[in-house]
Amino acid sequence: MARKAFTLSVPSETHVKEADYFGMVSGRDKNKFDETGLTPVGSTLVEAPYVAEFPMILECRVVHHHEIGLHTHFIGEIRNPIFLTRRELLDTTEKKKPCLKRLIF
C-alpha cells in the first residue's frame, strides 16, 4: 500500500498456465516471476512491475481500498494502457490480416 500503485498484466492464451499460477499464489510467499520464468519490467509511470510477455498492461494508481476479511479490494484509476504488438503475439494462422491472439481476462 505504500506505493499506492499496481499494474494489471493481461496474458494471451499462450501464457494461460503462468497467469493461473499468478492468480493462485501470493507474492508474499513466493517470487512469481522466478517460479514461472516470466520477466518483470519496472513501470516508468507507477511504482509497480508488469509482465513483459503479456500483450496488454494497465498501469494504475490506487484511489480506494477496502479490507474484506483476509483480503484487500483495490480500486484503481488507469493511468496508462499499453498494448504490445510483438510478432509472437500475432495470430497469422488464418488467411486474413494478422490479429492479436486471444487475451485471457
Image (tube, grey):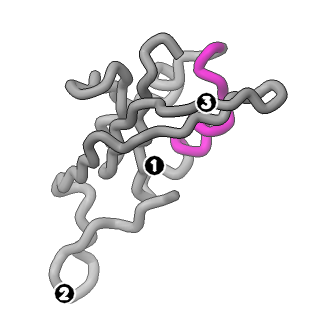
Local SS, label 1? helix
Q: Position of residue 82 (x, y in %)?
A: 24, 47
Q: Is residue 24 magenta?
A: yes
Q: Nearer the viewer, residue 47 or 53?
A: 47
Local SS, label 2? loop
Q: Nearer the viewer, residue 73 or 14?
A: 73
> Mark 2 highlights which residue?
96
In the orientation shown, which residue stands out farthest toward the top?
Answer: 2
Q: Position of residue 54 (x, y in %)?
A: 35, 45
> Mark 1 highlights which residue?
15
Q: CA distance from mark 3 to mark 2?
A: 44 Å
Q: Is residue 12 magenta?
A: no
Amino acid type, label 1: His
> Mark 3 highlights which residue?
65
Are the residues flagged by discs 1 and 2 in contact, CB closer than 8 Å?
A: no
Magenta residue span = 18-28
Amino acid type, label 2: Lys
- Label 2 Cα neighbours within 10 Å, binned few <14 / some 14-19 / many ≥20: few
Q: In this image, 83 relative to 5: left or right?
A: left
- Hey, which quadrant is residue 45 in on the image? top left
Amino acid type, label 3: His
Disc number for residue 2: none
The answer to whether residue 84 is above or below residue 28 is below
Name which residue lies at 52% across and 24% down: 32
Q: In this image, 90 relative to 7: left or right?
A: left
Name which residue lies at 52% across and 51% down: 16
